[in-house]
């Protein structure tokens, strides 16, 4: 029995083949745009990683080399994670004594290509398995909530959670940063949001004026506690202190 193929059916099959090909290309190419949400007009928001390919490779190298060097000095009371975004390093976790906290920061600052270090490690006991599981769950919920938002690019942010404190790292506008913070504050289980975000202007994003992946200055770090209502205004974010520590600013 022969099957008659109509022109319309042929066109549909061709469209499916092209769609599948585009999906395969996207899985093989790191910088292919990613559709992360729908715009108000109905079109999808398309975003790529705002870091240059060089910055992305540097971040991977910083994390790998940093983790290896921290393991070299690690002891039974040291549980530290190192995260890098656009060559800005975030240290989280616990250490046994203040001297180890300083040593970990010195290691991070001594890594090639690091522009700045935010040391959020604390002296105290390590997180329990239950706490780490909860942190992983919170990270997943925050990422999903950012992806669901239709007015920001979720790929602009990296999410790290430590003891119910969510760290937002990224390269974003002030509006995007405030919006991402507001969304994160609304996620169940989040006790505080710390923003380790490099602020860029809308004009800089539109004109692609960043060169070499280093981005404009200043870097900004700011921390806010969640509130019952997301409409609570946020204080302005202060420039990154010279010491590299995060500035904790409660919601007013």
Image: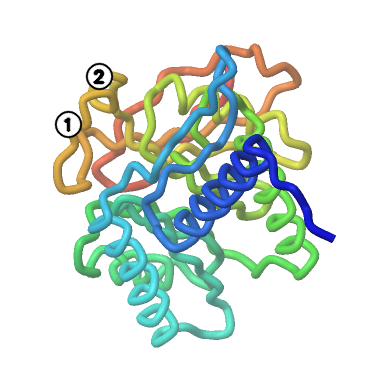
Closer to us: 50 or 95:
50
Nearer the N terminus, badge 1 or badge 2? 2
Left or right of 80 on screen, residue 198? left
Image quarter of the C terminus: top right
* Residue contact at pointers 1 and 2, CB within 8 angstroms: yes
Closer to us: 108 or 199:
199
Q: CA distance from mark 1 to mark 2?
A: 8 Å
Residue named by callout 2 = 203
Residue named by callout 1 = 209
Q: Position of residue 224 (x, y in %)?
A: 56, 30
At a point 67% along the width and 18% down the height, the residue shown is 230
Question: In this rendering, is residue 204 above or below 7?
Answer: above
Secondary-structure class at tag 2: helix
At a point 46% along the width and 25% down the height, the residue shown is 176
At a point 61% along the width and 35% down the height, the residue shown is 146
Q: Position of residue 221 (x, y in %)?
A: 39, 37
Left or right of 107 on screen, residue 235? right
Kindly identify which numbered label has been placed on residue 244: none
Question: In this rendering, is residue 155 above or below 57?
Answer: above
Displayed quadrant of residue 218: top left
Q: Residue furthest right?
A: 1
């Amino acid at each position: 029995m022969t099957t008659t193929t109509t022109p319309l059916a042929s066109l549909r099959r061709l469209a499916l083949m092209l769609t599948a090909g585009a999906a395969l290309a996207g899985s093989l190419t790191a910088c292919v745009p990613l559709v992360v949400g729908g715009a108000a007009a109905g079109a999808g928001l398309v975003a790529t990683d705002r870091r240059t390919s060089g910055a992305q490779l540097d971040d991977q190298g910083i994390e790998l080399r940093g983790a290896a060097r921290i393991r070299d000095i690690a002891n039974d009371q040291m549980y530290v994670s190192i995260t890098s975004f656009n060559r800005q390093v975030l240290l989280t976790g616990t250490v046994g004594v203040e001297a180890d906290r300083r040593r970990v920061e010195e290691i991070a600052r001594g890594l090639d290509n690091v522009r700045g270090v935010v040391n959020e490690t604390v002296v105290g006991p390590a997180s329990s398995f239950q706490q780490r599981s909860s942190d992983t769950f919170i990270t997943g919920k925050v990422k999903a909530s950012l992806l669901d938002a239709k007015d920001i690019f979720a790929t602009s942010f990296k999410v790290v959670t430590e003891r119910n404190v969510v760290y937002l790292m990224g390269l974003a506008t002030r509006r995007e940063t405030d919006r991402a913070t507001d969304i994160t504050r609304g996620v169940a289980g989040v006790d505080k949001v710390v923003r380790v975000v490099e602020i860029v202007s809308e004009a800089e994003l539109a004109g692609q004026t960043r060169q070499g992946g280093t981005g404009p200055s200043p870097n900004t770090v700011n921390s806010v506690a969640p509130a019952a209502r997301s409409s609570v205004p946020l204080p302005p974010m202060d420039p990154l202190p010279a010491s590299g520590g995060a500035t904790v600013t409660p919601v007013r």
